[in-house]
Amino acid sequence: SLGSVPAGPPDAIIGLTDAYNSSTAPHKVNVGVGAYRDDSGKPYVLPVVKVAEARVIEKGLNKEYAGIAGIAGFVDRSLEFAYGKNSDTLKSGRVKGVQTLSGTGGLRIWGEFWKKFGGDGILLPDPSWGNHTPIFKNSGLNVETYRYFDYENSKLNIDGMLEDLSKASPTCVLLHACAHNPTGCDPDMGQWKAVSDVIKEAGHYTFFDCAYQGFASGDAEKDAASIRMFVEEGHDMALVQSYSKNFGLYGERVGCLSVVGSDADNAANIVSQLKICIRPNYSNPPVHGARIVEEVLSDAALEQDFRDQCKEMSERIILMRSLLRSTLEGLGSEKDWSHITSQIGMFCYSGLNPEQVDRLREEFDIFCTRDGRISMAGVTQGNVEHISSSIHEVTKK
Ligand code: PLP
Ligand code: TYF
């Protein structure tokens, strides 16, 4: 019988939203989950998404199943978006992909595929997105980490990273393509080249997780630079893309998993095996959101609108970073807050400890994860004073 099933704990990130929703404090702030909010704190649908969605509906398409690999036109546009429209490797046919249930679904399918054909383990950065470890454990993989963040100095630990990658026996190495979650610290291009060299030397397989293309710097081309450099360097590699943040399509679950094979046949063989992993999981992906992305990326004017609107979101976040930092400094906080503005992407890895995070929630109704990660997307001109004075209060000696 199932009578003895114990209650499970709430998810460390999603559970915060429930706690936030239950709070009755008028000044409550949700800076937990990484979902964009406008300056009035409201969820935001990109105008270009509304236009493309209207066009999709206008077409009066049927609701038949997509194939196991999803909508081919969406996958083609997605590969151009990540690898670059002019990529010779893309034109050569060595890059092939499948539509996935957003980033999360692509990660899981990759985990299962790697376990079947690649190896028993995967190497993640320390720290990494909280869902990575359970996704890969549930795929049957042993999860190990390489040093990534210098917790003492709030910056990338590039030497530790290179050393750990060079010493590990050949395995799959997960890299965040841009806007590392949760630290907001990425290698610069010189450091990426060093990472590429070490991975080649050690014989690892590279797996990029790209959840913030366009959102990190405001320029989707720049945010894909790490991926494109690895392709230029000749790596056999895989990539998972999420359209949750950059297109704001969170609940539509739009993603793409692709591989750069040794040749076109190898890429096609890998895709055929990815489809065999997908079929018993969910059979085929939802069509609506993928049609929207395909519509946008197939029309030069809509694509430009997308790029402009994505840039606007990332610019609001950058503005909130400087506002949060300057307000804290204006309050007389003597701590070094320079990392708030040097980190990129959606999150500020604030350095607050779990006790300080608990005080923020209990005394000030500010909800963020216990690792001190603050979603900058939840910061607005209206709440930045409250957030700053509360952080100042809990970090005073
Ligand atoms: N990978 C990283 C690094 C993320 O930060 C996220 C979302 O926060 C995802 C993957 C997956 O998101 P989704 O499943 O909505 O695409
Ligand atoms: O804030 C984060 O890091 C993510 C956001 O299905 C998220 O956990 C939330 C729901 C989901 C995927 C990602």
Image (cartoon, rainbow, N blue to C red):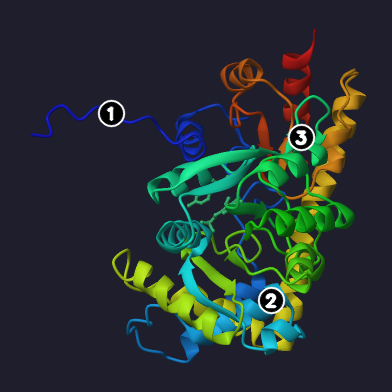
Front-lying residue, 106 or 101: 106
Give the label on residue 81, or none.
Answer: 2
**Residue ID at (74%, 41%):** 161
Which residue sits furthest top? Answer: 397
Question: Is 351 situated left or right of 342 in this image?
Answer: left
Which of the two discs, 1 and 2, sits closer to the camera?
Answer: 2
Alpha-carbon span between mark 2 and mark 3 = 34 Å
Is disc 3 placed on a helix, strand or loop? Answer: helix
Q: State whether label 3 is within 8 Å of ligand 2.
A: no
Kind of residue at disc 3: Val
* Neighbour tally class for label 3: few under 14, some 14-19, many 20 plus, Cα within 10 Å: many
Q: Secondary structure at mark 1?
A: loop
Judging by the rendered image, the residue that carries numbered circle 1 is 7
Residues tagged 1 and 2 counted as in contact (Cβ below 8 A): no
- Residue 321 location (% of width, % of height): 82, 41
Residue type of the residue flagged with mark 1:
Ala
Crowd band around label 2 with a 10 angstrom C-alpha radius: few (<14), some (14–19), many (20+): some
Amino acid at the residue labelled 2: Phe
Which mark lies nearer to you, 2 or 3? 2
- Lower sequence index among marks 2 and 3: 2
Choose the circle earlier in sequence order: 1 or 3: 1
Judge from the rendering whether residue 71 lies leftward or rightward of residue 312; answer left or right. left
Q: Residues within 10 Å of mark 1 (few under 14, many from 20)?
A: few
Q: Nearer the viewer, residue 97 or 350?
A: 97
C-alpha distance separating marks 1 and 3: 36 Å
Which quadrant does the N terminus fall into?
A: top left
Q: Which residue carries the number 3 mark?
A: 384
| 119 sits to left or right of 351 | left
Q: Is 129 in front, or is 192?
A: 192
